[in-house]
Image: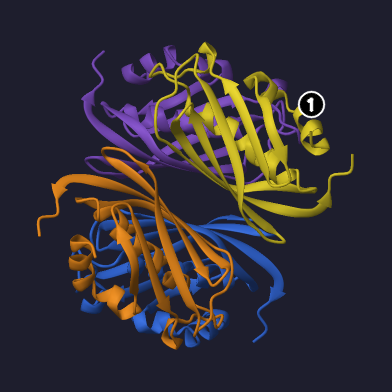
Chain colours: A blue, B orange, C yellow, D purple
Amino acid sequence: MNTIVDYMYQHDAFSQWLGIRRIAEGEGHCTLEMEVRPEMVNGFGIAHGAMTYALADSALAFASNARGRKAVSIETSINHLKPVMAGDIITAVAEETSLGHKLAIYHVRVTRGQDLVALFKGVVYRKEEEWNL
Amino acid sequence: MNTIVDYMYQHDAFSQWLGIRRIAEGEGHCTLEMEVRPEMVNGFGIAHGAMTYALADSALAFASNARGRKAVSIETSINHLKPVMAGDIITAVAEETSLGHKLAIYHVRVTRGQDLVALFKGVVYRKEEEWNL
Amino acid sequence: MNTIVDYMYQHDAFSQWLGIRRIAEGEGHCTLEMEVRPEMVNGFGIAHGAMTYALADSALAFASNARGRKAVSIETSINHLKPVMAGDIITAVAEETSLGHKLAIYHVRVTRGQDLVALFKGVVYRKEEEWNL
Amino acid sequence: MNTIVDYMYQHDAFSQWLGIRRIAEGEGHCTLEMEVRPEMVNGFGIAHGAMTYALADSALAFASNARGRKAVSIETSINHLKPVMAGDIITAVAEETSLGHKLAIYHVRVTRGQDLVALFKGVVYRKEEEWNL
């Protein structure tokens, strides 16, 4: 368990509302899981795009901040590939594609079992300020 | 009031959870507003990135579907420019930048009073299937 | 005429190869024009995607650097909306959507007469270092 | 050698101007290489962003069209990670991340030796029309 991720998660009311489970975490990587609930569904009867986005964005925040310096999102993008339904369990795996002094890039794959349901990319700005817990 | 948006909103459990208010809507455009609540905050004590994303993504869905054909998101991206706090009221204005037969592009500006807090872009695929309500 | 843009353009061999004409320029904005030549065409017989990208990317570089501090691209994206042919004259208009201390965002519209042929977005990192000409 | 890529390349004047060498190609993948020349440099004395973009975009076009149906770019984005100089040899490897009936997604890594210099993502629309050579 990473201390920074632990602190962030404890203070992250929305990730808790999502019901995120932390599967794996460390410097530059993070795996999260959640179950889609009926209150997360949109006007098409499928999970609101913000649900897969939220899971991936939390994985990005945890993976990048776990490196020790505070990291904030500059640009994130997501491709929704398959519809996700209430009751589905989805998993986000964030990996570091590039780590520079000021900038880092992460790709997050969101899957449901063997299905790839969304692809997410995030660029973060790495502040000089360190987490001090 | 647009019939399609009305139907979508009535069935959109997550937009209702967000507490979205529909300010304006029509073919190719939509303005939504919401108040950030304490349960929407992340580990930095600011609104989770998925909250501004969700508001903008709902505005995209309403604006594009209001044209009559079912439209689904292909790629969306967001730049978070300023932190948003619990208690803030944020507004998303979705405008159509390009309308083709199969594809359309929307830009959404998310503001808090005079401050631009996020910029969102969405590309949608327009199905042949029409909303039939 | 902006001194920084003038210097950049004089040293920009590729923008010269493109045959870029500088229509307007200043702090945070830039308008460029070029004619598509037969050697710029791809395997579909239309302008290679890199041609509209190049025009827009040069407009981004000029608009952002004209502010005085050296600015480098973090992420750029482009949507190609309509095919461009050899002989077409295309115009790129770069506008500043957001200006922060470290980051700035520009949107560039590429048109051919009344037609919008491409939409480009660029995020730049603004270095502390100033242009000193 | 793939017949479609061969045809596209033979008719792609700009890829030829770039001096692209085809290293590997097939359904859904493509590897290209080129040497950066002095006329490809920008006002910072480094390769114009459009050069790495062009190499990656050609790799995207070849990889996606090699599947047999005509594929056109919907949205492409690139992160420039390290400066590239005249004289450098750069390689683009395009891989298919997602293949649907109408849409497909490709990620392209551009490297110089061991260095990752750019990351590119492309979403294409797959027409019904097949290449018929």
Residue at screen point 72% across, 48% down: C71
Residue at image position (58%, 64%) is: B81
Q: Which percent across, then down, holds residue D57? A: 47, 32
Please report, as a chain letter, where disc 1 is located: C
Mark 1 neighbour density, 10 Å: few (under 14) some (14–19) many (20 or more)? few
- Say whether residue D112 is visible: no
Is A55 placed above or below C113 here?
A: below
Q: Which residue is mark 1?
A: C10
Residue at screen point 41% across, 79% down: A15
Measured as percent of width and height from the top left, residue C20 is found at 65, 24
C76 or B16: which is nearer to us? B16
Q: Is residue B109 visible?
A: yes
Q: How many marks?
A: 1
Q: Is residue A47 above or below residue C29?
A: below
Q: Please name whichever residue, B59 or C60, is drawn nearer the observer in this view of the structure.
A: B59
Residue B84, x across and y down, in percent? 54, 76
User: In the shown orientation, is residue A32 left or right of residue C5?
Assistant: left
Q: In what element is the residue under mark 1?
A: helix
In the displayed image of the protein, which residue is found farthest to the right? C133
The image quarter in which residue A91 lies: bottom left
- In front of the other: D119 or A2: D119
Vertical position of residue C132 compared to residue D91: above or below: below
Type of the residue with mark 1: Gln
Q: Position of residue D105 (x, y in %)?
A: 36, 43
The C terminus of chain A, quarter of image: bottom right
